[in-house]
Image (spheres, rainbow, N blue to C red):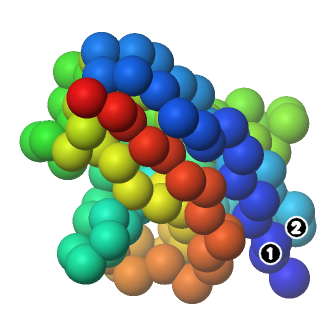
Amino acid sequence: QVQLVESGGGLVQAGGSLSLSCVFSGRHFISYGMAWFRQAPGKEREYVAGMSGSTGRTDYADSVKGRFTISRDNAKKTLYLQMKTLEPEDTAVYSCAAEIESYDYTFRGNYDYWGQGTQVTVSS
């Protein structure tokens, strides 16, 4: 069974930086595509970034491209999200997600496993 635990959220001023981590518990981490999503109060969940375990390819939502960087350490079974130049609009609960990379896997598709999320608050 896969379990995901995020950490690293907090309060930061606009223009600041923050890094999130997501520890994967389970087998064959490299076989999973991983992604970060976020959900702000009163809004739908939004895709942020994704990363393939098999190819290392990455994908970003337009709203974070150039500011956020997704990465993973397969030996540590950990996914990261480095966030720079944060804006108040980035305030949300950030969750990581995992999906086995079968033939129909897509970065922005459906994910089977989710973490509980970590709160990121950006003050203006």
Residue drawn at point x = 85 percent, y = 36 percent: 76
Residue sitting nearer the eye, 69 or 124: 124
Q: Secondary structure at mark 1?
A: loop
Look at the image and tell me in which quarter the C terminus lies: top left
Residue drawn at point x = 61 percent, y = 42 percent: 9
The answer to whether the residues at label 1 and label 2 have Cβ atoms under 8 Å apart is yes
Where's residue 20, x and y in %?
A: 61, 37
Which residue, given by chain and number where applicable, does mark 1 sit on? 2
Residue drawn at point x = 87 percent, y = 63 percent: 25
Instruction: Looking at the image, tell me whether mark 1 or mark 2 is earlier in sequence order.
Output: 1
**Residue 88 visible, this angle:** yes
Residue drawn at point x = 80 percent, y = 75 percent: 2
Where's residue 58, x and y in %?
A: 36, 38
Under mark 2, the amino acid is Gly
Q: Secondary structure at mark 2?
A: loop
Q: Relative to 49, is 11 on the left or the right?
A: right
Which residue, given by chain and number where applicable, does mark 2 sit on? 26
Category of crowding for the residue at label 2, using alpha-carbon neighbours closer than 10 angstroms: few (below 14), some (14–19), many (at least 20): few
Q: Relative to 103, is 115 on the left or the right?
A: right
> Residue 85, located in which quarter of the rendered image?
top left
